[in-house]
Amino acid sequence: MKKNLTRIWLLLPLLLLGGIFTACSSDDGETSSGGEEDGTMRRTVLVYLISENDLNNVVDYDIEEILYASRAGSIPQDCNVIVYNDGVDMPSITLYNKKKSKVLKTWKQDQNSADSTVMLQVLHEMVEYAPAEHYSLVLWSHGDGWMPTLETQKQQYARLQKELLEEMQEQRTNRRAFGIDNGLNDDSEDGDYDMNISSVKWVLEKLDIHLDYLLWDACFMQTIEVAYELRKQTDWVIGSPAEASAYGAPYTTAAKALCNADIEGVMKTYKDFYSRLTDVPTFPFSAVKTSELQALADATAPLIVKYFSDTMPEGEKDAQVYSDRNIITEPEDDGSCYITGPIRYDMGSLMHKVLTPEEYTQWRPLLDKAVPYKLTPSEHWGLSNDPITYYNTLQDPDHYSGISMNVPQQQYDFYLFNDTNRYCYLGWNTYFKNSFSWWTAGGWADTGLDETDIFAVKYLANYFMERYKL
């Protein structure tokens, strides 16, 4: 998730802004004349904001930054930036360019912007309002990388339940994948609506426009699994493998680079922006060149098979990580479990700890071709008002790569508490196997993991046979 500024960092002053922008359209759902009046542009930057959650108190700052870029003439003459925002007010679409800012549409009723059909419809409308020769996309909200949504985990659990269980245990989990729309028109985070990466991929396939880049203005989205899955829809994937600042993209200074699809320029604006802030450290951030991902996959797959087929390699415990190594907390009194998430390994660091020096020397250049731009984070990043923890500390600067990697583990499907008869079904390995091309391309399909009790059906069956002496 993007970090909430009211809980973590001081709010960014609205320097140089010409006041708060007030939407001028009615709420009757009618559209005013759109981008067509300016003709087809060279590029349209589509910005899709899902802020109907606890990020609603910071979304206005990013919108104000885009507005300032428009008023200051920072958006090039041949570029449109078109913004969809679903927050505590009714969803709306607003156009920004060098000439003006203009509300094009406001919906009469709220809608679930984390629903794939809604996202597809809205993006289609945005493209119609602002036709262009080239397109780019910014996805702004909470994020949790490749992880399945809560609803997906429940559906997987129900399938197992039909075969092996009499009742389904309730559980609480963090949100997964991308976006939270709570459906409440307020700024609470609670809600049932979020998106799997497969849904994002489906939207982009149906939208049928190739993107120059996809910028994740969200946490944890820069993973090898996500980037590889979306490699055919976009030339570049930009984002953070870790928790990102709620300041997010510096739209005021980045507008020109975003409009020009200048990836190096985008990275420079992030570096310059965060290096000037004394209260907000630079966090891990990178840009992935998707045309280089297949070569990286081809080189990675045999190494995964070699080192991860039997047991977890010894060196993994010393690799750079972007999340807590404690997968789950103790069971709650109400019978539920609180899931903290999987271990997110830095891909470069993990492979350095596992491979021989010769293997790493041959493999690393392919990773660097696939991730040619990365910001080296501050020595510590994350919560400025909390004790620094190892997973937001730069532990392995020499082999840091700016992209995370998942390693399937037995406890990722079914977690058993050692001192109780309690269990929690997670289904992460099963989802990873069934939902991401990296499972095969990255070598995991040939490790034999799906032929062992790492997956839930056999593991669960063995557990219940032992527990009930079946």
Image (cartoon, helix red, strand yellow):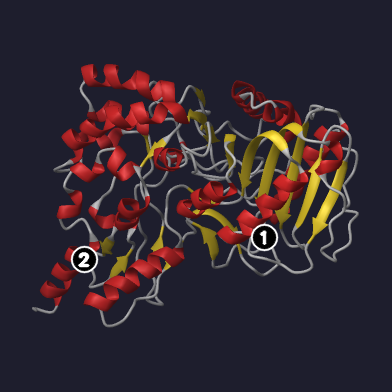
Whether residue 337 is visible to the viewer of this picture, yes or no, is no
Name the residue carrying label 1: 52
Residue situated furthest bottom in the rendering: 166
Q: Is residue 124 above or below residue 45?
A: below
> What is the x, y in percent for residue 39?
82, 36
Measure how far apart labels 1 and 2 are at the Cα level: 37 Å
Q: How far from the left and from the top, in percent, is residue 163?
A: 23, 76
Question: Residue at coordinates 40% horizontally, 30% vertically from top-left?
Answer: 293
Q: Residue 272's x, y, as percent?
A: 66, 23
75 relative to 413 in the view: left or right: right
The quarter of the picture where the C terminus appears is bottom left
Q: Residues within 10 Å of mark 2 (few under 14, many from 20)?
A: many
Quick one: label 1 or label 2, which is nearer the N terminus? 1
Q: Which mark lies nearer to you, 1 or 2? A: 2
Residue drawn 37% across the image and 48% down it? 436
Q: Position of residue 124 (x, y in %)?
A: 67, 51
Q: Which mark is residue 457?
A: 2
Q: Residue placed at 13% from the left, 68% from the top?
A: 462
User: Looking at the image, which residue is at 73% across and 31% down?
Assistant: 255
Q: Amino acid at mark 1?
A: Glu
Q: Which mark is residue 351?
A: none
Q: SS at mark 2?
A: helix
Asked whether, in this view, residue 422 is left or right of residue 278, the answer is left
Q: Quick one: which residue is furthest to the left in this view?
A: 469
Q: Is residue 358 above or below residue 99?
A: above
Say above or below: 468 vs 180: below
